[in-house]
Image (cartoon, helix red, strand yellow):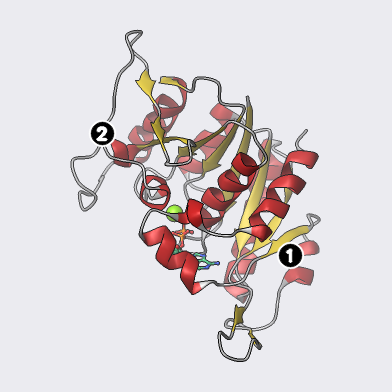
Amino acid sequence: MKHIAVMSGKGGVGKSYVASGLAIGLHRMGLRVGVLDADITGASIPHVLGVARGARVNPDGRMAVGRSRGGIAVVSMSLLMPADDKAIIWRGPLISRAITQLHDDTDWEDTEVMVIDMPPGTSDAALTVLQSIVPDAAVAVSTPQDLVTTVASRSHDMALQVGVPLLGFVENMAYLECPHCGERVELFGASRAEQLAECGAPVLAQLPLVPGHAALADAGRLEDAQLPAFEALAAEVWKQLP
Ligand SMILES: Nc1ncnc2c1ncn2[C@@H]1O[C@H](COP(=O)(O)OP(=O)(O)O)[C@@H](O)[C@H]1O
Ligand SMILES: [Mg+2]
């Protein structure tokens, strides 16, 4: 099974959106796809992909995966929680152990490629994923903002330091297309693609902010969206996977 980590230096830049979109893109290529929601305290993948809460244990004692409507395998701490508004207030070591358990003690069945929604930043938990799961490759999410771009380059540095190849950056919320006149509005300012590329990894995709996608994600139906940019990203990532 191949593992692709979706990282970001900062929360709220669309890491889970990109992880879900990438998983959907790979799934549309005909691959058997799983998503490990490794953002334990900010778990959101089941919400975006519409996976019902509740965990089942197989006869061999391993946890069974949840399934999106389209059939993407999903494992997340939030499937085990009694309600979405319950906070997980754990210290680093416990969070790290939860991530490795969700990964190791799950029956991933015939999953061919796993997308990992990483914990944000360069924390203990992020390091756990990179060092104990050891993804085959990583993708870092950024937005066109100075701070975010700088923080995204830290993800690049972290991947470099632990020896996980960073395939490149995804610049999310790069622009918004006006629904009336079609004009491109650069919400956060001009693209920082050049600045990102200076880190030594290419920009794989520049994604627009699509209000309809936010609504679909909120309704757990991102799989119903037209996602040409994610299909292109998935094809590129799959091609480049070592
Ligand atoms: N390009 C986009 N178009 C529309 N909505 C987006 C986009 N990127 C992110 N969002 C929405 O913005 C919110 C934050 O994104 P999320 O993926 O949860 O961020 P993170 O995982 O980095 O904290 C979510 O509601 C998500 O659906
Ligand atoms: Mg998230």
How far across and down, in percent of the image, does residue 122 sit?
Answer: 53, 49
What's the residue at 32%, 9% (across, down)? 59
Categorize mark 2 by other alpha carbons within 10 Å: few (<14), some (14-19), many (20+).
few
Query: Does the Cβ of the disc 2 residue fall within 8 Å of ligand 2?
Result: no
Between 38 and 214, which is closer to the camera in this rendering? Answer: 214
Relative to residue 98, is residue 238 drawn left or right?
right
Residue type indicated by callout 1: Leu
- Return the disc, 2 or 1, that comes first in the chain's sequence: 2
2 or 1: mark nearer the eye: 2
* Real-space CA distance between mark 2 and mark 1, rounded to the nearest whole angstrom: 40 Å
Furthest residue in direction top, as rendered = 60
Q: Is residue 162 above or below residue 189?
A: above
Between 232 and 90, which is closer to the camera in this rendering? Answer: 232
Q: Tell me which corner region of the image, top left, top right, bottom left or bottom right, holds residue 33.
A: top right
What's the residue at 35%, 58% (across, down)? 219
Q: Tell me which corner region of the image, top left, top right, bottom left or bottom right, holds residue 91.
A: top left
How far across and down, in percent of the image, does residue 185 sit?
Answer: 62, 86
Q: Quadrant of ligand 2?
A: bottom left
Q: How many marks?
A: 2
Between 209 and 164, which is closer to the camera in this rendering? Answer: 209
Residue type indicated by callout 2: Gly
Categorize mark 1 by other alpha carbons within 10 Å: few (<14), some (14-19), many (20+).
many
Circle 2: element type: loop
How far across and down, in percent of the image, does residue 239 sit?
Answer: 79, 40
How far across and down, in percent of the image, does residue 41 sit?
Answer: 34, 47
Locate the C terminus by quadrant.
top right
**Which residue is tagged 1?**
196
Circle 1: element type: helix
What's the residue at 63%, 24% (across, down)? 1
**Which residue is tagged 2?**
54
What's the residue at 68%, 33% (across, down)? 136
